[in-house]
Amino acid sequence: MYSEKVMDHFMNPRNVGEIIDASGIGTVGNAKCGDIMKVFLKIENNTIKDAKFKTFGCGAAVATSSIATELVIGKSIQEALGITNKAVMEALDGLPPAKVHCSCLAEEALHSALWDYSEKNNILIEGLEKPKTDIGHGHAE
Ligand code: FES
């Protein structure tokens, strides 16, 4: 049912944790399943230098947030915006249909962290909208 990559990122998630001096922090939650994802980004000179996550959720949510942090490190902000849930799923060699929403949460968590960064720095990131699943800060622990 799950690809080897999904299982690998679920069993050995990359970039778990927090960034103390994060440039942007995004927390999103799926109201239906109750899963919560929190993403921390360190951004310097328009480049994502580091990314970490904490996910309270299903295995696919853990795997998608893990791969999303891997995909986003080293990217520019505009490139990071291009990391859609489809890109996340492709990088994991697919997800079962019932788990597609978990990859959406990963995309939204990235957007939420970028939104936080844009608000804190008073900059406009073209093409970025605040995700509807954004639940603000301090709910992921
Ligand atoms: Fe909720 Fe996967 S079941 S994110």
Image (cartoon, rainbow, N blue to C red):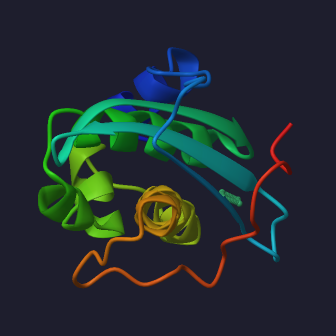
Q: In the rendered view, tell whether residue 134 sits above or below residue 105.
A: below
- The answer to whether residue 1 is visible is no
- The answer to whether residue 66 is visible is yes
Q: Residue at x 62, y 85 (%)?
A: 132
Q: In the rendered view, tell whether residue 98 sits above or below residue 117.
A: below
x, y percent for residue 107: 42, 63
x, y percent for residue 31: 82, 76
Q: In the rendered view, tell whether residue 46 sits above or below residue 126.
A: above
x, y percent for residue 19: 55, 25
- Seen in the image, is 92 located left or right of residue 63? left
Q: Quadrant of the C terminus?
A: top right
x, y percent for residue 52: 49, 30
Q: In the rendered view, tell whether residue 61 sits above or below residue 19.
A: below
Q: Residue at x 85, y 63 (%)?
A: 34
Q: Residue at x 75, y 54 (%)?
A: 36
- Quadrant field for ligand 1: bottom right
